[in-house]
Image (tube, rainbow, N blue to C red):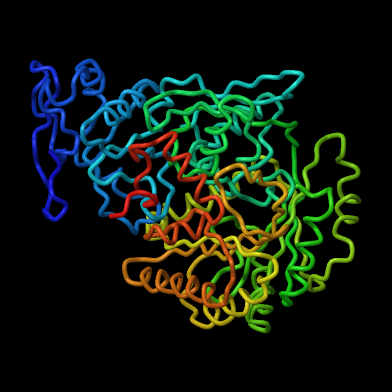
Amino acid sequence: MIMSKNISGRVYIIMSFLISSLISVLGRYLNPLISIKSSSSIPNHGTLSVKLAPKLHFTSDAIKMASTDFGKIITSNIPSAVLFPSHIDDIKNLITLSYNSTTPFPIAARGHGHSVRGQATARDGVVVDMKSLSNSHVGTRVSWTSSLGYYADVGGEQLWIDVLCATLEHGLAPVSWTDYLYLTVGGTLSNAGMSGQAFYYGPQISNVLELGVITGKGEFFTCSKHTNSELFYAVLGGLGQFGIITRARIVLDKAPKRVKWVRMLYHDFSAFTRDQEHLISITGLDYVEGHLLMNQSSANNWRSSFFSPNDVSNIASLITQHKIIYCLEVVKYYDDFTTHTIDKELKVLLEGLSFNPGFVFEKDVTFMDFLNRVRSGELQLQSQGLWDVPHPWLNLFVPKSRIFDFHQGVIVNMIHARNITRGLVLLYPTNRKRWDDRMSAVTPDEDIFYSVGLLCSGDNDNWKAMDEQNKDILEFCEKAGIRFKQYLPHYTTREEWIDHFGEKWSIFQERKTMFDPKMILSPGQRIFHHV
């Protein structure tokens, strides 16, 4: 039995399983969506029900955890239950139970809960807490073969920080990262995994050799470019629509010991973008990013405390003079063998750049400290009660040919003029050739596009104003004909999703029919589920 969607309030009912001896009150908040009422309702599933019973939680704490995310904006997608799996078979059994039901119920995998628009929620369904698998998996396994080189087999539930720590013990590390490492492997691979290394190494999805995936039919497959390739390409960047990633084989390379970390300041947007585009066209650097400094933001932010107090004062004066300052950020790795040459190499790479004289800053830190640079800022914000607040983030890929129009219409005329943005604004170019077009992820159709991240933090009083500004930004881009793509996308209509995927929409639909025909998985994305 499915309850009508117009029934308001919290629904309290009793869940009963196929085997009569199992009938008992399992907890509150269970919606009749999982209709396992009698042995006649879902034939031949008594064993599955018995196995899942102890791992399905209905407590208010579990439901509350699974109803929200890092964004703190969507809170109405309340699930009926939360599965805490101890083995991937528990996930297979859950999906199989839904798939074979007369009325399948929705299922969403939740990693670290870092989505911002309820993408990992499942209203009236079951949320799978992927972190629970960490108790049963053996962790990161590092291997080498003559054909593949070094690689790591990791669980989809593992955090990238744990992968980093484990691989560093072997003197190795993945080559592509996100700025924040406390995200799950399965979560970032379901989107793309972007950071300043992507211009050279590609996003994280371009550095995967093999996956273990449970499809929307409850079937487990090992897939790669050569085996079950259609599933492999579908899942990478597939927003959780085709399967739940339980394992990934990640490309590794020799890990450096330290990094030279340089920030250069510009007052001229044209010079800033020209130098960024030059740096991603040459070899030698390992990381290129950029961000904006304005009156409403501090030179040091939660991503890293880079500048000294004296530097902060000088930068503040520069911001007062020019209103918007652009910070170009680069990193070059080095180790014991290149200690004596790194400064010379870096000088050559940065020669001829047009940053403001006297506004170049350098740090020398360990490889781990650089990659984990966001963590200290997170802990500080947590201690101040400023981390678990609404995050009306907007991430866009903007084609190079329209970045000046975007800058004037959005950065200057909206973000700077309105002065309501509280948070970081990222803006840096990357190379499309490092992306594999066979994967589900979409980018603008130009050789170079810019990753723009409006990473705002608000409170209960002002986050809606920032969210309205995001809508204005999207409307401006639409009217101006800027063919952007949302990264970590959020849309509410089928037409918007069709436009988002463009030429990939037809194959996206075909893959959905192939791997999740009953549309069970990842309803919070609202691609095939419209609430």
Residue under the point 83% across and 34% down = 336
Residue under the point 57% across and 52% down = 442
Rendered position, 448 above or below 223: below
x and y, in percent, of residue 527 in the image: 39, 51
Nearest the camera: 53 or 180?
53
Which quadrant is the N terminus positioned in? top left
Residue 390 falls left or right of residue 28: right
x and y, in percent, of residue 174 in the image: 66, 35
Residue under the point 45% across and 37% down = 242
Rendered position, 65 above or below 213: below
x and y, in percent, of residue 431 in the image: 72, 53
Q: Write down the quadrant of residue 111 in the picture.
A: top left
Nearest the camera: 298 or 246?
246
Q: Write down the quadrant of residue 146 in the picture.
A: top right
Residue 27 falls left or right of residue 230: left
Q: Write down the quadrant of residue 312 in the picture.
A: bottom right
Nearest the camera: 182 or 101?
101
x and y, in percent, of residue 470 in the image: 46, 70
Rendered position, 164 above or below 9: above
Residue 396 falls left or right of residue 522: right
Disc tally is 0
Nearest the camera: 218 or 396?
218
Rendered position, 110 above or below 147: below
